[in-house]
C-alpha cells in the first residue's frame, strides 16, 4: 500500500521522479576538446613570437646564378681593404664532391650575427658563377684579400675566380660576336661619367690605375651592367721617353719589384675579371719579365687581355702555361680619331666576327669614340651581331 501521508504532503501536481543516473562524458568529446585547445595554444604561441614571419627572400632557394648572399659594402666610394680573416660570410657546407670535381654544392648561408636558422640555401654550380647584376657593384668578400695598398683579388676557398664571378652574363649563342673594350676610364671625371652613361652595357670598360675615384666609378659601371678590366702599365720601347705612367712594370726591375707594382694596380678597385696591358711592347716580349706577371694572374684567378698592339707579345703562350684566361684585340678602333675611320674599323670587326665567330676591338674613352661606338652597337644588333663582354671570348685553359 502506498504511503498516504506522504502523498498528502507532496505538492500538488508533482509526480514522483526516479533518481537521476550519473551522466558519462564520451571519450570522443574529450579528444576533440584537447585538439581544439592545442590548436589555440599553438596559434597563440605563433602570434606572440618576436618575429612571427620571415621575409620570403630570406628563405627562398636561389637560382644557380646567385652564388652567395653578399652584404653591402660599408662605403659607396673607395672599397675599404678587407682583412683576410673576414674574407667570407660564415657558412656550413654540404658538398656533393669536392670543389675540384666541379660538381654542384649546397651551401647553407648563416647570418653574421648567427641568430636563427640559415638565411638562404644556395645551390652552387661552379660552371655558372656569374654575378647577379643587381649586386654586381658589391665585392664578393670571398674573392678579396687585404694587401698593403688595398684589397686584392684572389681565388675563393671553393675555387671560384674573379674571372667567373664578375663576368657579365651573355646569351651563349654561337652567332657572330663582337667584344669591345674601351680603356682609359677614371682619368677624366667628365669623360668617365659620359662613357658609363652612353656606352651600351655589353661594352667592357678598362680603368687606368692612375685615375681618381676608381672605386666610385667601378660601382657606377657595374651598376650600369658593364664588365670591367684593370689596365696595367707595362714598359714600351723607348722608355722612359715614352712613359705609361706611375708604377710601370719594367724589364730591368726584379720580379719582386714588378709584382709590387702589379699589386698596386690590382688594389685600386675590385669587381673586375682581369687586366689589360697599357703599352708594354718591350715588357710583353721578355719572358723573364712577363712570366712572373702571368703566374700571379693565374694564382689570383684573373684573365689577361692583350690589346694586340705588339706582334712580339709572349702573352698567349704564357697565359696558357699559367692557366690564365686570355683574349687578344683584333684591332685598335680609334688609332685615327675620325668618325669615318672608327666606323670603318668597327665594320671590319663585324666582318671578322662573321668569318671566325668573334672579334675584339680596343679603344679609348674619347668622346668621339664613345659616341661612335654607342651608335654603331645599336645598328650592329639589328644586323644580328651580338655584343659580348670580353670574358665571353676569352680562351680559358681551366675549361679546356
Image: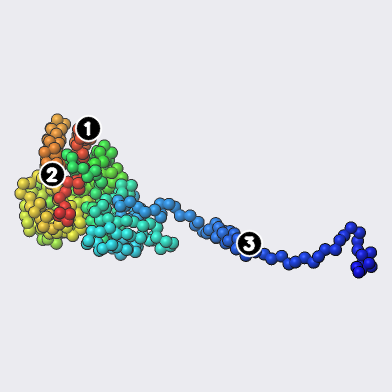
Quick check: 103 above or below 392? Answer: below
Colour scheme of the picture? rainbow
Residue 323 visible from this viewpoint: yes
CA–CA distance in space, label 2 to label 1: 24 Å
Mark 1 closeness class: few <14, some 14–19, many ≥20 residues within 10 Å? few
Q: Is residue 398 left or right of residue 156?
A: left
Please, what secondary structure does the residue beneath circle 2 have? loop
Q: What label does residue 329 carry, if any?
A: 2
Determine which residue is flagged by label 3. 29
> Where does the C terminus fall, quadrant-wise?
bottom left
Residue in the foreground of this view, choosing between 11 and 382: 11
Q: Report the residue that reaches farthest toward the front.
A: 1
Q: Are marks 1 and 3 in contact (CB under 8 Å)?
A: no
Cα separation between marks 1 and 3: 75 Å
User: At x 94% / y 67%, what residue is drawn?
Assistant: 4
Looking at the image, tell me whether mark 2 or mark 1 is earlier in sequence order: 2
Residue 382 is labelled as 1
Amino acid at each position: 500500500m502506498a504511503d498516504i501521508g506522504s502523498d498528502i504532503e507532496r505538492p500538488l501536481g508533482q509526480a514522483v521522479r526516479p533518481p537521476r543516473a550519473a551522466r558519462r562524458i564520451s571519450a570522443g568529446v574529450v579528444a576533440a576538446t584537447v585538439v581544439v585547445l592545442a590548436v589555440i595554444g599553438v596559434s597563440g604561441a605563433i602570434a606572440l613570437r618576436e618575429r612571427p614571419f620571415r621575409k620570403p627572400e630570406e628563405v627562398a632557394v636561389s637560382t644557380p646564378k646567385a652564388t652567395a648572399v653578399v652584404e653591402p659594402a660599408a662605403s659607396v666610394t673607395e672599397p675599404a681593404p678587407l682583412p683576410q680573416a673576414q674574407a667570407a660570410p660564415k657558412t656550413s657546407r654540404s658538398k656533393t664532391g669536392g670543389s675540384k670535381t666541379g660538381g654542384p654544392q649546397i651551401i647553407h648561408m648563416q647570418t653574421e650575427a648567427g641568430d636563427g636558422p640559415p638565411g638562404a640555401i644556395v645551390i652552387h654550380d661552379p660552371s655558372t658563377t656569374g654575378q647577379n647584376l643587381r649586386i654586381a657593384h658589391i665585392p664578393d668578400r670571398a674573392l678579396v684579400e687585404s694587401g698593403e695598398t688595398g684589397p686584392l683579388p684572389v681565388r675563393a676557398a671553393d675555387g671560384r675566380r674573379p674571372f667567373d664571378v664578375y663576368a657579365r652574363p651573355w646569351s651563349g649563342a654561337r652567332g657572330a660576336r663582337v667584344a669591345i673594350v674601351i680603356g682609359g676610364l677614371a682619368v677624366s671625371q667628365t669623360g668617365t661619367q659620359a662613357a658609363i652613361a652612353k656606352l651600351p652595357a655589353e661594352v667592357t670598360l678598362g680603368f687606368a690605375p692612375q685615375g681618381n675615384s676608381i672605386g666610385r666609378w667601378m660601382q657606377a659601371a657595374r651598376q650600369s651592367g658593364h664588365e670591367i678590366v684593370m689596365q696595367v702599365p707595362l714598359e714600351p720601347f723607348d722608355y722612359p721617353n715614352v712613359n705609361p705612367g706611375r708604377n710601370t712594370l719594367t724589364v730591368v726591375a726584379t720580379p719582386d719589384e714588378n709584382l709590387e707594382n702589379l699589386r698596386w694596380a690590382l688594389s685600386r678597385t675590385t669587381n673586375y675579371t682581369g687586366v689589360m696591358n697599357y703599352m708594354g711592347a718591350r715588357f710583353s716580349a721578355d719572358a723573364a719579365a712577363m712570366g712572373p706577371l702571368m703566374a700571379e694572374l693565374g694564382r689570383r684567378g684573373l684573365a689577361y687581355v692583350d690589346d694586340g698592339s705588339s706582334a712580339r707579345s709572349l702573352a698567349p703562350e704564357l697565359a696558357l702555361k699559367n692557366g690564365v684566361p686570355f683574349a687578344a684585340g683584333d684591332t685598335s678602333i680609334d688609332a685615327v680619331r675620325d668618325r669615318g675611320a672608327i666606323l670603318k674599323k668597327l665594320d671590319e670587326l663585324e666582318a671578322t666576327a662573321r668569318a671566325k665567330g668573334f672579334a675584339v676591338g680596343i679603344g679609348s674613352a674619347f668622346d668621339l669614340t664613345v659616341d661612335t661606338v654607342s651608335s654603331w652597337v645599336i645598328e650592329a644588333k639589328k644586323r644580328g651581331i651580338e655584343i659580348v663582354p670580353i670574358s665571353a671570348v676569352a680562351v680559358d685553359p681551366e675549361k679546356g
